[in-house]
Image (cartoon, coloured by chain):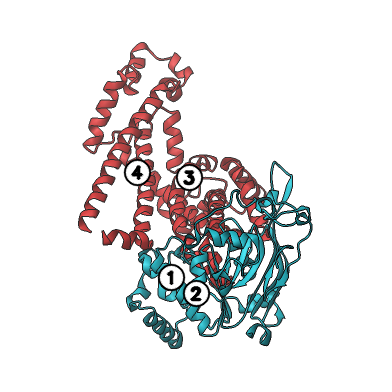
Amino acid sequence: MNRRWYIFILKNLIRIVLLTVCISIVTFALMKASPIDPLQANVGQAALGSMSQEQKEKLEEYWGVNTPPVQQYLSWAGDFVRGDMGTSLLYRQPVTKVIAVKLSNSLMLLAIAWILSGILGFALGVISGMNRGRLADKLIKGYCLIISSTPAFWLALLLLMIFSVWLHIFPIGLSVPIGVEASGVTLADRIYHAVLPALTLSITGVSNIALHTREKMIDIMESDYVLFARMRGEKGWRLFRYYGFRNVLLPAVTLQFASISEIFGGSVLVEQVFSYPGLGQAAVAAGLGSDLPLLMAITIVSALIVFGGNLTANILYGLIDPRIRRGGAEK
Amino acid sequence: MRQEEREPVLKIENMSIVFTQYDRGMHQTELPVIRNLDVEVYAGEMVAVVGSSGSGKSLLAHGVMGVLPYNASMGGRITYCREELTGKRMEKIRGKEIVMVPQSTAFLNPLMKIGPQIRKGRKDEESRKKLRDIFRRYELKEEVEKLYPFELSGGMNRRILISTAMIEKPKLVIADEPTPGLDLKVAKRAMEHFRELADMGAGVLVITHDLELALEVADRIVVFYAGTTIEEASVQDFEKEETLRHPYTKALWRAMPKHGFQYIPGTQPYVKNLPKGCPFAPRCSQCTGECSKEIPYRTVREGKVRCIYAE
């Protein structure tokens, strides 16, 4: 048993390292291949024109325009391995600090959206799958298909228009009220500002989870063991509780943790629409502003969070499923 | 004979099962998987429905239990204890008076322990005691209750599956292919378990492809060919070829190892291209033009046969 755990941990450590290396290389290469000129993007054409050659050279050095890419990557990697993620060129602060602030802003948003879409998606998927072909199923399926073909940013704009512009129920953007000192911001303020973006992420997240859960539920309802349970007179709530729920829970766990990546990805666009100063918005700013150290760090942190989600699902699977738990322990 | 004295527990008359399928786009076709199926089962009796694979045997069980897939429809009449077995009535007695024993442990919930699964989640002392008695009877250890289906050994499987029937008080037991892939000794033992259920007073309907095994334990044999019952004979009728009635049954008899292993050419027709009238006609040496007409199921020498030339 112990040995199995050592191998498991070792395997995943190797995976994390490989993942980080690959992601950083790809991100770096994409950044270098992007047509954005850091000087023009950050200083502006007009300001650049009025600068002396000396000033320009200084700026070019700051943004690393003339350093060979390989050397640049290696020096970044060397620092990264030593735990130094560098300084953000845009925020002029250590990258770790920027990420800490942005992540803590986003975390509440992501957590609300993740839990809400997980629970709602699971419930809708189960109801739909258990009632396949009936009205409830058709309504849920229709809703999910419409939502999953709706772009998240468009939905965000729509909600913004309805609830903020027309109805004045929710703020139009940002994560805290305007004109209030940082110390004066209450938790209620933060939640109030997070509602709309979290709602957008939840609504779009629900459809995916619900449709997947529905498929799994249908598979289970058509399985031999449910057929036999029905022949033994099991139906309704008991059939769901002992046969449907237990068996759909396993794929649901995987789905829930795999959905972290989608919520994360969705937050990039949604935060942009709501001017929500989270990790997603910082990623966009870093990308458009050629802030290489920040973008590299955000990409890697996101990848690690997603990796962590999948890893958690794997571990939970082993704990929940007796075929893995007991089957493994025997050998 | 007891057939005349008592009413059958289960009487299936003229059952048909049709599947509606889409082939090539929106074109609907109907697959008559079962037509003209007649079976009777009396209390304390074991009847074996014997047919080769692909003859639609398993659907017979699903049809009686009322769990056919949504694209299947059933015709004919099923009578249970003198009254017609409607869907509503079946809902009430399914799993209590009428139980089915499936083919394999794939029909057990993989995430539910054996004990609670057989008891259907009941926790009262009575059902616990009953299960312990059943386990003792089948020489299963009490620890087996705490195992999951995947942890069962091959030898336990059959006994676990039949325990699901024993825990109820069934008047009718339907066993679907209870001996697939088992070696002769285990298969025989499995069949004997069903015989015991019949001896305890239940009507037992065994659906199987194994004629030899069925002959050892059953009282009557119903021969099933291409979705149709073509003969009903007592086990004694199988002692000699002459006492059998239908040419296909006779061919089956000759194909048994102890009777010379002879086979007849051809295969069972697929439901889509069934011949009119007798489904066995294309392979039958006695076949005439009359065989393509409607063939009645008639009584011949205390058995039944669907052949106009049987006597």
SS assignment at label 3 = helix
Taking the spot 76% from the left edge, 62% from the top edge, the residue there is: B295
Q: Label 2 near label 1: C-beta < 8 Å? A: yes
Tag 2 residue: B217
Q: Whole-Å distance between the Cαs marked 1 and 3? A: 56 Å
SS assignment at label 2 = helix
Specify few, some or many for label 2: CA neighbours under 10 Å numbering under 14, 14-19, or 20 or more: some
Amino acid residing under circle 1 = Lys
Specify few, some or many for label 4: CA neighbours under 10 Å numbering under 14, 14-19, or 20 or more: some
Tag 4 residue: A304
The nearer-to-camera label among 1 and 3 is: 1
The nearer-to-camera label among 4 and 2 is: 2
Q: Label 3 near label 1: C-beta < 8 Å? A: no
Q: Where is residue A127 in the image (x, y as percent from the top left)?
A: 59, 62
Q: Residue A262 carries which label?
A: 3
On whether disc 1 and disc 3 are found on a single subunit, the reply is: no
One can see residue A159 in this view: no
SS assignment at label 1 = helix
Q: Label 2 near label 3: C-beta < 8 Å? A: no
Specify few, some or many for label 3: CA neighbours under 10 Å numbering under 14, 14-19, or 20 or more: some
